[in-house]
Amino acid sequence: MLTITRDLHDKIVAHARKDHPDEACGVIAGPAGSDRPERFIPMLNAAMSQTFYEFDSGDLLKLYREMDDRDEEPVVVYHSHTATEAHPSRTDISLAQEPGAHYVLVSTADTDGNGPFQFRSFRIREGEVEEEDVTVVEAY
């Protein structure tokens, strides 16, 4: 289960709205071994695409060095889908390299009749996808 603060949840949704119609992407880092997302790090979608996201390799290297210096790890890796539901695509699954991370997807499309901005979380390990519950809290 992913437990995330209202503030971080709202920042992810705001980033998806801001970058629409392109996919938004980013990371929420947390203390190593804690499984607690704390530090919001919006990233640039280097692909600048409505159907694909890609972290800039230089920015990603800088981020991992920074997290290492701060004894953090990527607790949440997030991105948006602009025309499909919030579910990992085959490409998303093949690119998932953080087995301990929560993969959050936000859809900016109304794919279920309930309005845009579905917010869902998944664990992706060795190509296997498992959806998990999301609990939004005011504070940890």
Image: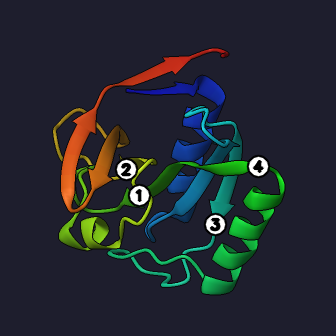
> Do labels 4 and 3 touch, CB within 8 Å?
no
Label 4: which secondary element: loop
Hey, what amino acid is under mark 2? Leu
> Residue shown at 18%/54% (left/top)?
128
The answer to which of 85 and 1 lies nearer the viewer is 1
The colour scheme of the drawn protein is rainbow
Label number found at residue 80: 1
Q: Badge 4: few (under 14), some or many (20 or more) residues near its Cα, within 10 Å?
A: few
For the residues carrying marks 4 and 2, which lies nearer the camera in this image?
4
Work out how far the residue at label 1 is from the one at label 3, CA to CA, in angstroms: 12 Å
Type of the residue with mark 1: Ser
Q: Which comes before the other along the chain, label 4 or label 3? A: 3
| Mark 2 and mark 1 residues within 8 Å of each other at the beta carbon | yes
Residue 19's x, y, as percent? 54, 64
Q: Earlier in the sequence, mark 4 or mark 2?
A: 4
Q: Is residue 9 above or below residue 62?
A: above
Labels 3 and 2 touching (C-beta < 8 A): no
Query: Residue 127: image x %, image y %?
Result: 20, 62
**Label 1 secondary element:** strand
Point 48% across, 84% down: residue: 47
Question: Mark 4 = which residue?
Answer: 71
Q: Earlier in the sequence, mark 1 or mark 3?
A: 3
C-alpha separation, residue under disc 4 versus residue under disc 1: 27 Å
Q: Which of pointers 4 and 1 indicates the residue nearer the eye? A: 4
CB atoms of marks 4 and 2 within 8 Å: no
Which residue does the image show at 83% across and 59% down from the upper left? 69
Q: Amino acid at mark 3?
A: Met
Which one is in front in this view, the residue at disc 4 or the one at disc 3? 4
Q: Residues within 10 Å of mark 1 (few under 14, many from 20)?
A: many
Quadrant that contains the N terminus: top left
Q: Which residue is mark 3?
A: 43
